[in-house]
Amino acid sequence: MSRFVYNHESVSRCIVGTVGLPGERQFFLQVVSLQETTCVAIEKTQAMALSERLRIMMRELRRNQLASLDELNISVERDDTALEFPITEDFRVGVIGISWEQETQRILVEAQAIGDETLTELLDEDEAALLEDAPDLLSFKLRIHQARAFCDRTDAVVAAGRQPCPFCGLPVDPVGHLCPRANGYRR
């Protein structure tokens, strides 16, 4: 089976959303552009890490004055609408990479599918041509204000899940949980 690359140049919407109840939620990264809509399954920890790394990148862009002030000062409006239907998983994300493209003033995000053998780095197009069975790839470019809105929504979606136990940090189910720090007593 050959590699499929989902490429989005002008993204109109990029969000993380969930399906299911807290504790059983499945996370999706959905990217919408004029060409198509791509929806990939992502782990909660991957969504949190992507949001955190994008925020670090945006701070560095401001601190080092790499992005134009016009791009940095666009106001942010969080997208709180639901995922677009039908929600079909194109692939499950394994590796995510982000980079800054100075000439286009865009953040490039690449999410690679979990392959038969997990690759430790994202492949560029030349390397992908050498491998017939390379994992699928989602590639999209975000403006800085879109990345900020993505981070705001992702943080809200993650926080809407089960709250962590103040003692052990594990998620607390609606009926409570057996806290290891309380020697098995319910809190």
Image: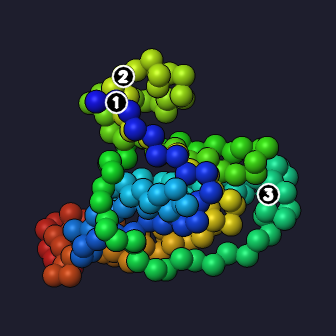
Element type where label 2 sits in the image: loop
Q: Is residue 121 above or below residue 91?
A: above
Q: Amino acid at mark 2?
A: Glu
Q: Is residue 45 visible?
A: no
Reading the image, the residue beneath label 3 is 62
Q: Please give the label number shown on residue 83.
A: none
Reading the image, the residue beneath label 1 is 2
Q: Amino acid at mark 1?
A: Ser
Out of 18 and 166, give the one closest to the viewer: 18
Which mark is nearer the camera, 2 or 3? 2
Q: Amino acid at mark 3?
A: Arg
Q: Earlier in the sequence, mark 2 or mark 3?
A: 3
Label 3 – label 1 distance at C-alpha: 40 Å
Q: Is residue 138 above or below residue 42?
A: above
* Image location of residue 19, percent across then percent down: 29, 71
Out of 131 and 173, give the one closest to the viewer: 131
Q: Is residue 75 visible?
A: yes
Reading the image, the residue beneath label 2 is 132
